[in-house]
Amino acid sequence: MAVDVLVGTQWGDEGKGKLIDVLTRDVDMVVRFQGGNNAGHTVEIGDNKYVLHLIPSGIFRKGVDCIIGNGVVVDPIGLMGEMTALAEQGFDMSQIQLSSNAHLVFAYHKEFDAFSESRLAEGKKIGTTKRGIGPTYADKAYRSGIRAGELCDLESLEEMFRTQLAKYNEIFTAAGMDALDPDEKWLELEKAAKYLAPFVTDTVQSVNSAIKAGKKILCEGAQATLLDIDHGTYPFVTSSSTVSGGACSGAGIAPRNIGTVWGVMKAYCTRVGEGPFPTELNDAMGEMLRKDGGEYGATTGRPRRCGWLDTVAGAFACMINGVDKLAVTKLDVLDGLDEIKLCVAYEIDGKRHDLYPSNTKLLAKAKPVYETMPGWKCSTSNAKSLDDLPENARKYLARVSELVNAEIGVVSVGPRRDQTFEVK
């Protein structure tokens, strides 16, 4: 099959950007199929660190087409800033194609996002990044959104933008907020539109032409399975389909063309924002994982909640995505521990549950049932193969693979590109 898909199997921040970068060694095209610039994919190459928000991670490989698909919501000003910054560092922006059907994120979406979050009571807040992602997807569903194709027609774009902004300003003023200045916001948007217009194209045709030509394609997911709008911990989720099936609608690909599904899983768990997290550690161990793992959001800088690996949720994610190969990241963060815990079941209202509950309220009551494994107490950061890992690290990986019912294909033992190896 011509198209592989890579998705996160937890609550995001698993290291998808790095893995995509590693897996693009032999591909011709990388496609982002959902989400927006609320996601941050970090890639370290040598001494340089890059954080991508909308641009596919294939941008670091010469000659790889980078597609921002129709399922993505795009902040045009943010995308222009990201592209110009990378261009100044010598990367080739001609590799980028922006779907004419991708919906656009505007200033009024971001303002409404922050406004909506502020009105929620404590314990009900979603933990949104306030990047306008949810309101843009809502406009898309409500059929009042503006798509990237309009960037090529400034007259039409301005008329549609001003009309929508006026509607949102009515909401803002009614709530006692300041209205956004339409002239100021239009001038900002106009500049971005002129910059981005040459990159706008029918990416569905581009992707399917590449498939027909036998080219190798990798679809890059943002966020992760447990944040999926249908299958995640609703309502504490993102606003798009983050699972492997979302690549079909978000990029315009027929299901029969999907080949290998890669799932990325951190060797422990993290979560940003609100929502249930059964294995969360609010103690010194949780703080150690945060500190040693550098667990701060690439997009917001917020500290991530940390906990032991939840294989109940992991098994669900591998099932729903049809994961063929698992990429386990940040194994090195566990190097100094005497023992490591794995959540293998939940206790809910005094009863053991071996399967992941679809009811978020039940998950919020879940207490983890742990299995304890011995640590390896030595560095794994220079490992180049499975044989280089200490025995207990290999046993840990084998047990994770067994519990989530997926074969491990890649292991990452540090942030750099060269600290990742394939499992043969």
Image (spheres, grey):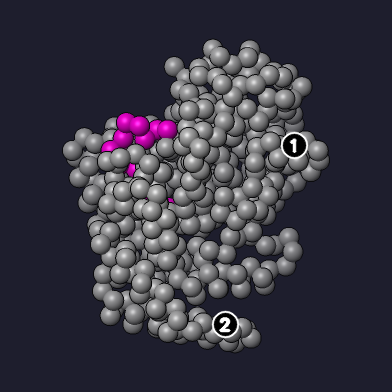
Chain part drawn in magenta? 22-34
Q: Residue at x 71, y 40 (%)?
A: 291
Q: Please state which of the two labelled residues, at mark 2 or mark 1, is closer to the viewer.
A: 1
Q: Amino acid at mark 2?
A: Phe
Q: Amino acid at mark 1?
A: Met
Q: Could you say which disc has been placed on residue 46 in the image?
A: none
Q: Examine the rendered structure and indicate whether residue 128 appears above or below residue 120.
A: above
Residue 239 visible in the current orientation = yes
- The residue nearer to you, when weighing 155 against 84, is 84
Q: Which residue is mark 1?
A: 288
Of callouts 2 and 1, which one flags the residue occurring earlier in the amino acid sequence?
2
Q: Residue at x 36, y 68 (%)?
A: 192
Graded by Cα atoms within 10 Å as few (under 14), some (14 to 19) or many (20 or more), the crowding at tag 2 reads some
Q: Which residue is mark 2?
A: 172
Percent across and percent down for residue 33 are 39, 50
Q: Examine the rendered structure and indicate whether residue 125 appears above or below residue 162.
A: above
Q: Quadrant of residue 83?
A: bottom left
For the C terminus, give its image quadrant.
top left
Q: Examine the rendered structure and indicate whether residue 367 appears above or below residue 391.
A: below
Q: Examine the rendered structure and indicate whether residue 160 appears above or below residue 389.
A: below
Percent across and percent down for residue 374 are 73, 18
Secondary structure state at the residue bearing disc 1: helix
What is the spatial separation of the Cα atoms under label 2 and label 1, in whole angstroms?
43 Å
- Left or right, 188 with respect to 281, comes to left
- The residue nearer to you, when weighing 286 against 349, is 286
Q: Residue at x 36, y 72 (%)?
A: 191
- Left or right, 310 with respect to 411, comes to right
Whether residue 406 is in magenta: the answer is: no
- Left or right, 298 with respect to 186, comes to right
